[in-house]
Image (cartoon, grey):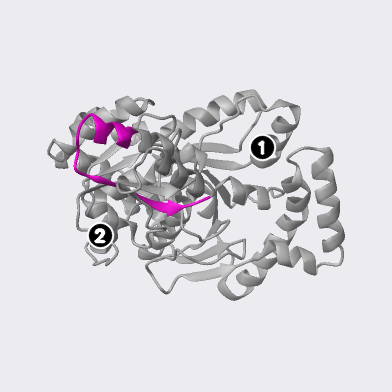
């Protein structure tokens, strides 16, 4: 009762909030960082979106008034008196202690980050809440004990028994920190990881990611000249092993050979596996059926015009792309993988649109979904869970004791 009263009081307070992410390149986590910034801004709070690597900015919040700042920690470290020496030493220690580069660099980069944050606060006021998103971000600023920081875990941990060094690294990242998980699957996975690594977080809670449904619907209706006029199945994302686009291509081969579908396959994205995927398509003699248009800067339009969107990942922290596809007005098939996919797809009829890990199962579920009406009522129930207002209220309740 007390927490709910505090949350109601804090709704009337304008907060100063920083959302911190490694880069603003195209990706699900980066889109969520922008969405969360918009969500807080719409509720009247002051928002600064901070990114830490000097990479091209490909994703921005919809609200142009949101302050976007680059704190280039690599460059700022080099500018210090010992920066170059420390980077060389860190590289050497990384050879001696495998995968420890983030430990040595992050030790000083954390101090630099909070020094630069104070400079921003001189002009904008002290931050009430700092939301750091993703493992790569945690590693850059691990050496903190600032209780304003909430670390948002976006994905599951693949190595549950990482060995002595791995457990040590994990405790550096998570011990005494406030942790938020984006799905029940990630939350349960973190509990398992916590036990195996002897982690003692300050706080552990599940808060999912916001989706601006109306914004997605507007963007999905915009004209994109590259979109083909033939029926197509869509796969979209980074071409990395986790996303397992090879599974989708194999399923598509079955759909063409056994189910005789007329649809093409469009794989929109980029990544280190692109050349291997193109070669695989060539091996299967599917060059005239499978197309690689590159990154879709308006993925929602590509989703809207597709016959079905397919997520073929081995695991997903949440699977925001599923929700975005639903918001764009298309249907979805997903592999029943560990993480947050079940949080979305275990609602009513949507459960029938989950496949197991085999290409045969995926092909069969895609074919059935292509030939069934979109379950609009079930999709509406799913979308309601990701309301920006609801997500913002959960974060505010989380920090209400510290603010009031």
- Count neighbours of disc 2 (C-alpha within 10 A) and say few if under 14, some if 14 to 19, many if 20 or more: many
Q: Position of residue 217 (x, y in %)?
A: 24, 58
Residue 141 in view in this figure: no
- Asked whether residue 30 is drawn in magenta, I would say no
Question: Which residue is the extreme one toward the left?
Answer: 373
SS at mark 1?
A: loop
Please indicate whether residue 31 sits to the left or right of residue 261 in the image: right
Q: Quadrant of residue 165?
A: top right
Above or below, 231 relative to 17: above
Closer to the chain start, of discs 1 and 2, is: 1
Question: Height in image: 331 above or below 295?
Answer: above
Q: Position of residue 371 (x, y in %)?
A: 14, 36
Q: Which mark is residue 306?
A: none
**Residue on which disc 1 sits:** 175
Which of the two residues, 314 or 37, is positioned nearer the viewer here?
Answer: 314
Q: Residues within 10 Å of mark 1 (few under 14, many from 20)?
A: some
- The residue located at (40%, 42%) in the rendering is 281
Disc 2, SS:
helix
Q: Residue at x 81, y 42 (%)?
A: 95
| Between 298 and 232, the one nearer to me in the picture | 232
CA–CA distance between discs 1 and 2? 42 Å
> Start and end of the magenta stretch?
251-271
Name the disc covering residue 220, or none: 2
Q: Is residue 198 above or below residue 89?
A: above
Residue sitting at x 55%, y 47%: 134
Q: Nearer the viewer's eye, disc 1 or disc 2?
A: 2
């Amino acid at each position: 009762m007390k927490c709910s009263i505090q949350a109601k009081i804090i709704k009337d307070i304008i907060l100063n909030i920083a959302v911190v992410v490694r880069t603003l390149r195209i990706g699900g986590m980066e889109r969520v960082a922008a969405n969360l910034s918009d969500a807080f801004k719409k509720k009247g709070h002051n928002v600064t979106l901070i990114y830490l690597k000097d990479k091209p900015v490909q994703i921005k919040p919809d609200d142009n008034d949101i302050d976007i700042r680059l704190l280039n920690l690599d460059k700022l470290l080099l500018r210090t008196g010992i920066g170059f020496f420390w980077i060389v030493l860190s590289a050497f220690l990384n050879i001696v202690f495998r995968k420890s580069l983030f430990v040595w660099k992050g030790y000083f980069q954390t101090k630099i980050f909070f020094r630069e944050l104070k400079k921003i606060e001189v002009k904008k006021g002290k931050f009430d809440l700092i939301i750091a998103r993703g493992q790569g971000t945690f590693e850059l600023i691990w050496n903190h004990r600032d209780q304003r920081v909430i670390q948002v875990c976006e994905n599951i941990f693949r190595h549950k028994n990482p060995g002595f060094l791995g457990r040590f690294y994990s405790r550096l990242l998570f011990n005494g920190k406030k942790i938020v998980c984006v799905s029940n699957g990630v939350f349960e996975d973190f509990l398992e990881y916590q036990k195996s690594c002897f982690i003692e977080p300050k706080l552990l809670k599940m808060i999912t990611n916001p989706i601006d449904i109306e914004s997605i619907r507007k963007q999905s209706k915009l004209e994109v000249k590259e979109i083909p006029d033939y029926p197509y199945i869509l796969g979209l994302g980074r071409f990395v092993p986790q996303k397992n686009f090879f599974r989708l291509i194999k399923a598509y081969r079955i759909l063409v050979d056994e189910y005789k579908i007329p649809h093409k396959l469009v794989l929109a994205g980029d990544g280190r596996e692109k050349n291997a995927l193109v070669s695989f398509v060539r091996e299967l003699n599917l060059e005239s059926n499978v197309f690689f248009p590159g990154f879709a800067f308006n993925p929602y339009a590509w989703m809207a015009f597709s016959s079905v969107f397919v997520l073929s990942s081995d695991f997903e922290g949440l699977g925001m792309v599923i929700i975005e596809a639903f918001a764009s007005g298309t249907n979805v098939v997903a592999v029943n993988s560990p993480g947050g996919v079940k949080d979305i797809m275990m609602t009513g009829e949507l459960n029938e649109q989950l496949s197991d890990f085999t290409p045969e199962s995926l092909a069969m579920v895609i074919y059935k979904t292509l030939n069934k009406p979109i379950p609009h009522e079930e999709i509406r129930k799913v979308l309601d869970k990701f309301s920006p207002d609801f997500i913002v209220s959960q974060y505010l309740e989380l920090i209400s004791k510290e603010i009031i």
